[in-house]
Image (cartoon, rainbow, N blue to C red):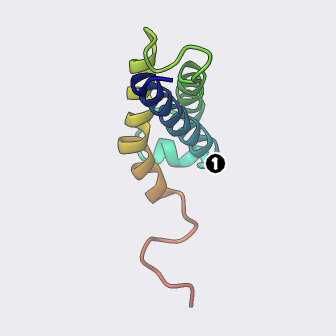
Amino acid sequence: MSLIKLLILVLSFGAFALAAFTFVDALMRPTAAFLAAGKLTKPIWASITGVSALVLFPYLFGLLSFFGIPALVAALVYLVDVRPAVRGMSGGRPPNTSSW
């Protein structure tokens, strides 16, 4: 296997792992947190990240397919923009409070 093919395979698995993580993360967050953060609803983000994970599956389409780059961008948008906003809203108590 050439070095280029190996690099593409590693990048494809990494992109798929990122998209799969964002899908699972979107499913675990409370529905109300998405609305409170002013983002799209939970089912929409779960759908976007789920489709991204399917598109980025290395043996199905892969990173270099026509939809691979937009799928990776969608997963990155969730990771960089949506997740931090929703993560701050999802606790039962305000942030920076001790459990004592």
Location of the C terminus by quadrant is: bottom right
Q: Secondary structure at mark 1?
A: helix
Q: Quadrant of residue 31?
A: top right
Q: Residue furthest bottom?
A: 100
Q: Dot 1: few (<14), some (14–19), or many (≥20) neighbours within 10 Å?
A: few
Q: Which residue is mark 1?
A: 28
What residue sits 53% from the left and 57% below the top?
90
Q: In this rendering, would 32 be left or right of 97?
A: right
Q: Quadrant of residue 96?
A: bottom left
| Residue in front for this viewpoint, 2 or 85 | 2
Please determine whether, in this image, residue 58 is positioned above or below residue 98: above
**Percent x, y for residue 91?**
54, 64
**Percent x, y for residue 49?**
54, 30
Q: How many marks?
A: 1
**Percent x, y for residue 14?**
49, 37
Q: In this rendering, would 9 be left or right of 77?
A: right
Mark 1 residue type? Met
Q: Residue furthest top?
A: 66
What residue sits 43% from the left and 15% below the top?
64
| Residue in front for this viewpoint, 39 or 78 | 78
| Residue in front for this viewpoint, 6 or 53 | 6
Q: Quadrant of residue 59?
A: top right
What residue sits 59% from the left and 24% below the top?
57
